[in-house]
Image (cartoon, grey):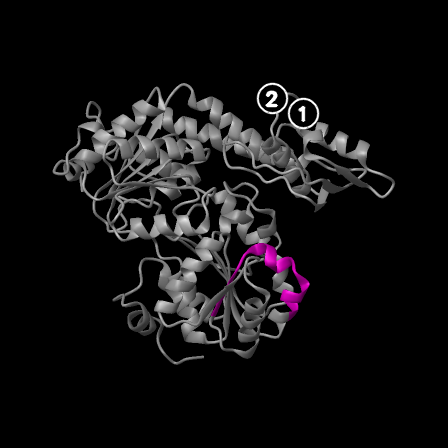
């Protein structure tokens, strides 16, 4: 272990004069061999919490993170700080994977980023045991919890590493309710962890929900606001098609704008992100695929053309505004037709009971004595009725896989985002099917998702302070009024703001 003080390492490698609130406590906890759970707000500097220990303690820090794009960004940032970092993903050539593993075993790697699914591969686990792993860091740890807004079953199995790695564990996230925090600690088998929860409050952000009857009307109001405000903006839309439509409308009005969603190729997504970070594009219209790892100081506006299905997701995305501490506005549109799409997205992510049972019924009917069903995807589509799509079937099969009722052996049903047209292809599916299955887990997840959607609708309809409503959702007290949200400043619409009046409107 290095004798350098963590704050010295922070200054030398990252150029910061000191730690932000909560960071040093987490860093010193894991350096002392303790487990730690950090709930730091968006922009709170979670990556520093495992990068500094990696520099101080030596050995290998293994970081579990959900997105390949986030891994690549973190590897680049770590390299700039003087850390030897790499990531492993399915898209890497075999030779590069072997090289990364060899570096991990030989001690010439400080940070290794992996997706949680890789921890289920026995060859990788065997290679880890030969490396000197001094810290397991679990980023976006809310993905562990089935009560969270972005549950991934593979995250649930990360805790099994406790029996194979003798090192402290650090769990980090920006959005977690009290129930999710408890679930994360239990699932990761944290041992008497140091829990650091910093305030979710971002006093420089103002919150507003405004009505918009049509997508065009919402973009028009957004344009009027963009003309008056300084800085850059991120605009979130629920589907790929709505992203491109909003981009086209804004571009037609003369705005320097780009579109970003998971349907674009990796080079195009990289191009859009680089233009935005360099200030060459003022606005990015995106699905929630955009934003993780984005730390741009001058985002003065984050707008949602429709509220997301969870307050966790909304707070995380809106929190990309005002990273520099200056005033910024978080605006969401709502309208009477939004509920139809929101309910449909819930059905896609967490299918209804009858949908699951119907798909399971068809799979069992097609399964031979070995319990393996071979069929065309369209067979399942037809079984669900004329309104069904491949995405509906993909969601149902995915839900059956999550609760252990089925296992996809070959073939795929790519889940296109939102309500877009599905990808083509007619590859047959081979699915292993259990004779008996407990679907209660899938039903619980649906109920939890519906409860989160109801919380979003309560937030949109509240007559009280929006800042107070958000903080209360995350278990934090706040004064009855903030004086800066649209509810506390009744009678003044955000569309009337100018660059000069933004500071007055936000009260900062």
Mark 1 neighbour class, 10 Å CA radius: few under 14, some 14 to 19, many 20 or more: some
Point out the image quarter for the N terminus. bottom left
* Residue at left offset 55%, top offset 57%: 91
* Residue at left offset 32%, top offset 44%: 201
* Residue at left offset 56%, top offset 37%: 423
Mark number, residue 297: none
Residue that label 1 marks: 384
Callouts 1 and 2 close, C-beta under 8 Å: yes
> Above or below — where is 106 with respect to 265?
below
> Taking 135 as reference, is 278 left or right?
left
Please provide the residue range marked out in magenta.
111-126
The foreground one among 211 and 230 is 230
**Predominant secondary structure, magenta span:** helix
Membership of 204 in magenta stretch:
no
> Above or below — where is 487 with respect to 197?
above
Q: How many marks?
A: 2
Residue that label 2 marks: 387
Q: What is the x, y in percent for residue 167? A: 55, 69
Q: What is the x, y in percent for residue 157? A: 62, 54
> Above or below — where is 222 with respect to 146?
above
Instruction: Work out which residue is located at the far right of the displayed protein and give it.
Output: 369
* Residue at left offset 46%, top offset 58%: 71
């Amino acid at each position: 272990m290095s004798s350098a003080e963590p704050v010295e390492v922070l200054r030398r490698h990252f150029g910061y004069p000191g730690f932000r609130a909560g960071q040093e406590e987490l860093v010193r906890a894991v350096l002392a061999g303790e487990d730690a759970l950090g709930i730091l707000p968006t922009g709170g500097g979670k990556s520093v919490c495992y990068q500094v220990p990696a520099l101080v303690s030596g050995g290998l820090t293994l970081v579990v993170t959900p997105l390949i794009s986030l891994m690549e960004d973190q590897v680049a940032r770590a390299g700039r700080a003087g850390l030897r970092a790499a990531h492993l993903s399915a898209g890497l050539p075999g030779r590069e994977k072997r090289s990364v593993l060899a570096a991990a075993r030989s001690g010439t790697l400080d940070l290794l980023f992996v997706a949680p699914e890789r921890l289920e591969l026995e060859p990788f686990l065997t290679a880890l045991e030969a490396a000197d792993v001094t810290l397991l860091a679990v980023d976006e740890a809310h993905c562990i919890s089935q009560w969270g807004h972005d549950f991934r079953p593979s995250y649930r199995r990360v805790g099994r590493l406790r029996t194979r790695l003798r090192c402290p564990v650090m769990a980090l996230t920006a959005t977690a309710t009290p129930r999710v925090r408890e679930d994360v600690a239990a699932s990761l088998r944290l041992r008497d962890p140091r829990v650091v929860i910093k305030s979710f409050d971002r006093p420089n952000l103002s919150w507003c929900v405004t009505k918009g009857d049509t997508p065009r009307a919402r973009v028009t109001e957004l344009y009027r606001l963009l003309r008056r405000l300084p800085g850059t903006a991120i605009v979130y839309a629920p589907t790929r098609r709505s992203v491109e439509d909003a981009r086209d409308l804004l571009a037609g009005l003369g705005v320097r704008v780009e579109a970003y969603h998971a349907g674009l190729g990796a080079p195009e997504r990289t191009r859009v992100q680089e233009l935005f970070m360099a200030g060459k594009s003022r606005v990015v219209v995106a699905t929630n695929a955009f934003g993780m790892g984005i730390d741009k100081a001058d985002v003065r506006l984050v707008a949602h053309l429709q509220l997301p299905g969870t307050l966790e997701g909304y707070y995380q995305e809106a929190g990309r505004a005002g990273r520099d501490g200056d005033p910024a506005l978080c605006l969401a549109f709502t309208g009477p037709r939004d509920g139809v799409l929101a309910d449909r997205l819930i059905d896609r992510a967490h299918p209804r009971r009858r949908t699951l049972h119907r798909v399971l019924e068809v799979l069992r009917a097609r399964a031979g004595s070995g319990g393996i069903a071979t069929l065309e995807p369209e067979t399942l589509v037809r079984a669900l009725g004329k309104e069904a799509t491949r995405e509906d079937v993909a969601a149902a099969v995915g839900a059956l896989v999550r609760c252990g009722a089925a296992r996809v052996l070959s073939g795929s049903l790519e889940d296109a985002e939102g309500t877009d047209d599905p990808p083509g292809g007619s590859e047959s599916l081979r699915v292993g099917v259990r004779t008996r299955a407990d679907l209660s887990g899938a039903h619980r997840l649906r109920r939890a998702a519906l409860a989160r959607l109801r919380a979003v609708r309560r937030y949109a309809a509240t007559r009280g302070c929006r800042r107070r409503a958000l903080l209360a959702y995350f278990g934090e007290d706040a004064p009855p009024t903030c004086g800066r949200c649209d509810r506390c400043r009744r009678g003044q619409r955000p569309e009337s703001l100018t660059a000069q009046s933004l500071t007055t409107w936000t009260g900062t």
